[in-house]
């Protein structure tokens, strides 16, 4: 079946409010003038820019996502943001379990499962990240690592809930390093993920799932990666901070 093509730009901890609005304006114009087809473009800025960018993008085909959220609806969690707060800004997606959150903030599969459930309950769509470290790749334990992340993080969802999920495979060793998994290596993991989902739910749900690749995607390698059978677009880091590079990557997802 025809799956939704998605290109999401994760801006991480970059861009002030003013800079975010300027980059959004530039990307919005390029999407309008140059992008053809039905690829879903998503911008994932720091929290401070969500509401302003959502207003700026009203009437456009570009969606907004948040980089993280808490699993509770409210409470004494200083510095945290709830799914309800995110929804109130106009955002529709939430990034869950990015490798930097797992690595630097110690997020566990159990916490990510709770976050995913909360995000879906609030009518938002999770982009759930999985990926292995360089050591796990070298030890050839990466299949088991990915399976554990998927099983513990997502398979508590029922079929209806899971239908709103997007999965992003991001090999940790390829993030911000300039290294990129070969199209064949990336395809191997994407195929594994789809197979895991088919075995747990069914083939129809697995076929409808959009699985993104993230890890030093650039205009020069995007088309080769996106041409793989089970790669449905990209979660873009550094290249999403340059409007021209980001749009060229979006074009490659057609």
Image (cartoon, helix red, strand yellow):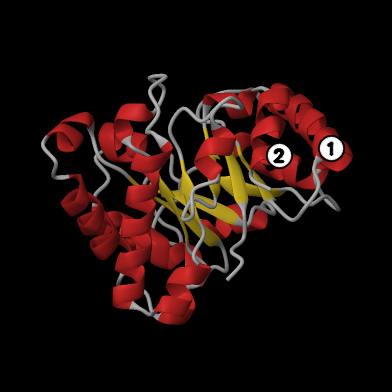
Residue drawn at x 33%, y 66% is 195
Q: Pointer 1 and pointer 2: residues touching (CB < 8 Å)? A: yes
Write down the residue under mark 2: 251
As drawn, 218 above or below 115: above
Q: 82 or 215: which is nearer to us?
A: 215
Residue 34's disc number: 1
Q: 176 or 253: which is nearer to us?
A: 253
As drawn, 66 above or below 196: above
As drawn, 52 above or below 163: above
Residue 236, image x, y percentages: 54, 35
Pick out the residue farthest to the left: 139
Task: Place residue 2 in its image quadrant.
Answer: bottom right
Q: Secondary structure at mark 2?
A: helix
As drawn, 70 above or below 114: above
Residue 61 seen in this snapshot = yes
Q: Is residue 17 left or right of residue 154?
A: right
Mark 1 burial class by Cα count in 10 Å: few <14, some 14-19, many 20+: few
Residue drawn at x 20%, y 51% is 143
């Amino acid at each position: 079946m025809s799956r939704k093509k998605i290109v999401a730009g994760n801006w991480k901890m970059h861009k002030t409010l003013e800079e975010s609005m300027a980059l959004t304006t530039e990307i919005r114009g390029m999407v309008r003038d140059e992008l053809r087809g039905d690829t879903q473009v998503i911008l994932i800025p720091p929290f401070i820019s969500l509401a302003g960018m959502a207003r700026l993008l009203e009437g456009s085909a570009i969606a907004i996502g948040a980089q993280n959220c808490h699993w509770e609806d409210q409470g004494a969690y200083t510095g945290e943001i709830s799914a309800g707060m995110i929804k109130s800004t106009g955002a529709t997606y939430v990034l869950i379990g990015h490798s930097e959150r797992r690595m630097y903030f110690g997020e566990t599969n159990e916490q990510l499962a709770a976050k995913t459930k909360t995000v879906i309950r609030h009518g938002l769509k999770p982009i759930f990240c999985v990926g292995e470290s360089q050591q796990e790749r070298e030890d050839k334990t990466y299949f088991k690592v990915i399976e554990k992340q998927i099983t513990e993080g997502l398979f508590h969802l029922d079929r209806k809930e899971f239908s709103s999920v997007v999965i992003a495979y991001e090999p940790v060793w390829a993030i911000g390093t300039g290294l990129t998994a070969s199209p064949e290596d990336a395809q191997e993991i994407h195929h594994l993920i789809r197979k895991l989902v088919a075995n747990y739910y069914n083939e129809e749900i697995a076929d409808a799932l959009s699985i993104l690749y993230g890890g030093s995607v650039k205009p020069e390698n995007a088309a080769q990666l996106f041409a793989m059978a089970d790669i449905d677009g990209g979660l873009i880091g550094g290249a999403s901070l340059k409007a021209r590079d980001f749009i060229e990557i979006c074009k490659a997802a057609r």
